[in-house]
Image (tube, rainbow, N blue to C red):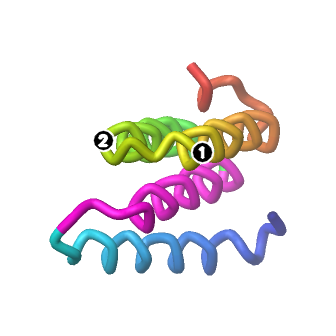
């Protein structure tokens, strides 16, 4: 992710999260938004936030029983680990 795209990607993920949370039921949109926020936080070197969003994305998938999404967001966490240059995201 290029540096100038991080704020825009973060805004879009935050907006998607807000829209997803307005729905009556937890949806995959919420998990995707958390995963996107994990990636943008890691790209912006905010490892503590990235770790929190990673946990929220994975727990959202577990609640819904969406194991295919769970695998994808586990991959996103792995990517965030290597793009941030720190192991704080995967601990």
Q: Residue 33 location, x and y as percent?
A: 48, 64
Residue 1 appears left or right of 33: right
> Could you tell me which quadrant the N terminus lies in?
bottom right
Residue 42 appears left or right of 20: right
Q: Residue 59 location, x and y as percent?
A: 37, 38
Label 2: few (<14), some or many (≥20) within 10 Å?
few
Residue 6 appears left or right of 46: right
> Hey, which residue is sitting farthest left in the picture?
24
Compared with residue 22, is residue 45 higher up or lower down, i.e. above or below?
above
Majority SS type along the magenta span: helix
Contact (CB < 8 A) between labels 2 and 1? no
> Could you tell me which quadrant the C terminus lies in?
top right
Question: Residue 18 falls in which quadrant of the image?
Answer: bottom left
Q: Secondary structure at mark 2?
A: helix
Q: Residue 38 location, x and y as percent?
A: 56, 50
Q: Secondary structure at mark 1?
A: helix
What separation in Å lies between label 2 and label 1 (alpha carbons)?
14 Å
Residue 3 appears left or right of 10: right
Q: Residue 54 location, x and y as percent?
A: 50, 41
Is residue 23 a member of the stretch shown in magenta? no
Residue visible at 33% across and 73% down in the picture? 20
Closer to the eye: label 2 or 1: 2
Q: What residue is disc 1 on?
A: 73
In the image, the segment drawn in magenta is 25-44
Residue visible at 34% across and 47% down in the picture? 64
Q: Nearer the viewer, residue 69 or 81?
A: 69
Q: What residue is disc 2 on?
A: 63
């Amino acid at each position: 992710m290029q540096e100038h795209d991080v704020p825009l990607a973060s805004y879009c993920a935050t907006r998607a999260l807000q829209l997803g949370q307005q729905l009556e039921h937890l949806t995959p949109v919420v998990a995707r938004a958390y995963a996107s926020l994990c990636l943008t936080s890691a790209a912006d070197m905010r490892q503590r936030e990235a770790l929190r969003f990673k946990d929220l994305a994975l727990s959202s998938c577990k609640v819904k029983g969406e194991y295919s999404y769970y695998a994808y967001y586990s991959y996103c966490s792995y990517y965030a680990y290597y793009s941030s240059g720190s192991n704080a995201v995967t601990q």
